[in-house]
């Protein structure tokens, strides 16, 4: 078989590349080892986790009605099989839609594992009856989009499904009485929140001295305060997990840390210590593709690898490992193949942690500004001054802009609070367009909404925010 373009991997980067290339008239073959399209994001990542987080959030909102408004409902009864079935229905609906879109675009989909024989040939491996032994697929170009998988330290591989990675946690086999989450990153905290709201007693242990170390510390504080309540103060930082062993249908774990030392047993353990790119075992050594020390494909700003026939996008192309980054890199790679002068040089790739409250940021962060020695104005609007936040009873959040003090150009944004992931898109647009803070203040925002806080935080920069008092800065730009 031969194809003008082969896309290896059917996740959000892979199918985006395949569909766009087909729309532009290229002959496209999509090779995916899974029986369904969608990749990690759809099948066992972003989508199922957000579906379960929706359940957790509704349960939490009912508790808020009882505590804050005096509206009482009976305690929830969790039918775990129906919850699991609903999650699977969401996955099936979206995956079926992708298959239909592939057919409509005449994208040939091959269910197989692709291994490079050389820079222009894949060996197809699989049990599917349509794949003959030693089948090969040659191509003019290949876009590598094989994604990533959860990292599991060898010491934690003890041969039991009671020790889970994120994939196992999303299968939702049961709601354990006790759950240990190893790792204080976004996946661990999101899944810990799900299980805690479903009724598990959740403990979080983190080797470093803070949760969500990729985010600014002020954004994390409101979340940590709420999680300490949800997890009954069982969050242990600067703590190492020494060993694990299955004992009497539980996992016995040893700890070494200032707040937790010794051992304790849990019904299940979720290991969430990061992800690694899927680049091993693909035969890349038979091509000119070069990998860095962490196993990522080395690419330029046009997503070209060192091999002139092979591009790489998404998680295999480096941090951040985010689905929306993958889909935009797919667009870049296809446009380059078509001879367009496209480059992937984004000023703002948004990151969202879908906990409660949510945390979102884009562009320059305070931590990054400090490391680079950059001087910025940090202008914060507390949600306690927001009528909408007060009405929702969610005043713990805030919105902040990082602004160039000389040009007033917006360089970064951080939001913590209910719905922060929806709000950050406006900030991404403003940063990418090179807007000044005045552009945001002069754009009329609807009232009462949380979106107003982006405008309000810009007004703080000029000392003109109506609902809070902050004197104007005295500098040449404002005098």
Image: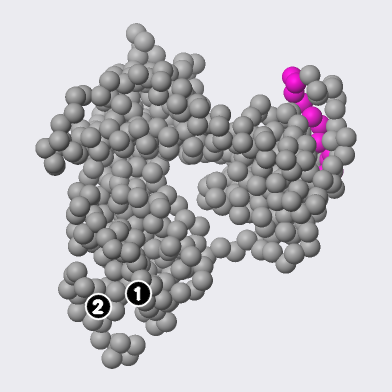
Residue drawn at x 35%, y 14% is 250
Between 194 and 386, the residue placed more toward the observer is 386
Would you identify the image quadrant in which residue 202 lies? Answer: top left
Colouring convention used in this rendered image of the protein = one colour
Would you identify the image quadrant in which residue 70 lies? Answer: top left
Q: Quadrant of the C terminus?
A: bottom left
The magenta region covers 117-128
Residue drawn at x 30%, y 87% is 478
Do labels 1 and 2 touch, CB within 8 Å?
yes
Q: Return the mark for residue 222.
A: none
Q: Position of residue 419 (x, y in %)?
A: 35, 50
Q: Is residue 56 magenta?
A: no
Q: Position of residue 316 (x, y in %)?
A: 62, 45
Which residue carries the number 2 mark? Answer: 464
Under circle 1, the secondary element is: helix
Q: Position of residue 346 (x, y in %)?
A: 56, 63
Q: Return the mark for residue 441.
A: 1
């Amino acid at each position: 078989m031969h194809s003008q373009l082969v896309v290896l991997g059917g996740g959000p980067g892979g199918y985006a590349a395949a569909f766009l290339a087909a729309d532009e008239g290229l002959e496209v073959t999509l090779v995916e080892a899974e029986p369904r399209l969608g990749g990690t994001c759809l099948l066992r990542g972003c989508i199922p986790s957000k579906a379960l987080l929706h359940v957790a959030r509704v349960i939490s909102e009912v508790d808020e009605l009882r505590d804050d408004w005096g509206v009482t409902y009976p305690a929830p009864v969790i039918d775990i099989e129906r919850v699991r079935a609903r999650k699977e229905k969401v996955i099936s609906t979206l995956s079926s839609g992708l298959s239909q879109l592939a057919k409509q675009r005449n994208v040939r989909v091959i269910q197989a594992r692709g291994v490079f024989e050389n820079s222009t040939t894949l060996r197809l491996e699989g049990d599917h009856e349509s794949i003959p032994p030693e089948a090969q697929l040659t191509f003019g170009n290949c876009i590598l989009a094989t994604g990533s998988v959860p990292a599991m330290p060898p010491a934690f591989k003890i041969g039991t499904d009671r020790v889970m990675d994120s994939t196992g946690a999303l299968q939702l086999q049961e709601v354990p009485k006790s759950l240990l989450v190893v790792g204080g990153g976004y996946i661990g905290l999101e899944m810990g929140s799900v299980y805690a709201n479903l009724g598990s007693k959740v403990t979080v242990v983190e080797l470093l001295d803070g949760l969500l170390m990729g985010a600014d510390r002020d954004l994390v504080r409101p979340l940590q305060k709420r999680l300490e309540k949800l997890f009954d103060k069982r969050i242990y930082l600067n703590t190492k997990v020494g060993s694990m062993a299955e004992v009497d249908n539980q996992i016995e774990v040893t700890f070494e840390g200032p707040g937790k030392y010794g051992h304790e047993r849990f019904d299940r353990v979720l290991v969430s210590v990061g992800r690694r790119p899927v680049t091993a075992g693909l035969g890349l050594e038979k091509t000119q593709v070069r990998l860095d020390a962490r196993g990522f494909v080395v690419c330029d700003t046009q997503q070209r690898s060192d091999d002139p026939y092979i591009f790489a996008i998404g998680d295999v192309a480096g941090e951040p490992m985010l689905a929306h980054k993958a889909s935009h890199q797919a667009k870049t790679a296809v446009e380059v193949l078509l001879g367009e002068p496209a480059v992937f040089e984004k000023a703002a790739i948004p990151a969202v942690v879908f906990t409660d409250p949510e945390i979102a940021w884009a562009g320059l962060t305070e931590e990054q500004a400090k490391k680079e020695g950059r001087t910025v104005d940090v202008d914060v609007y507390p949600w306690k001054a927001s009528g909408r936040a007060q009405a929702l009873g969610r005043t713990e959040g805030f919105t902040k802009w990082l602004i160039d003090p000389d040009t007033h150009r917006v360089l970064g944004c951080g939001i913590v609070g209910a719905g922060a992931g929806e709000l950050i898109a406006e900030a991404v647009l403003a940063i990418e367009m090179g807007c000044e803070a005045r552009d945001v203040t002069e754009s009329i925002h609807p009232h009462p909404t949380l979106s107003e806080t982006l405008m309000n935080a810009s007004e703080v920069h000029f000392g003109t925010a109506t609902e809070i008092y902050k004197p104007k800065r005295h500098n040449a730009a404002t005098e």
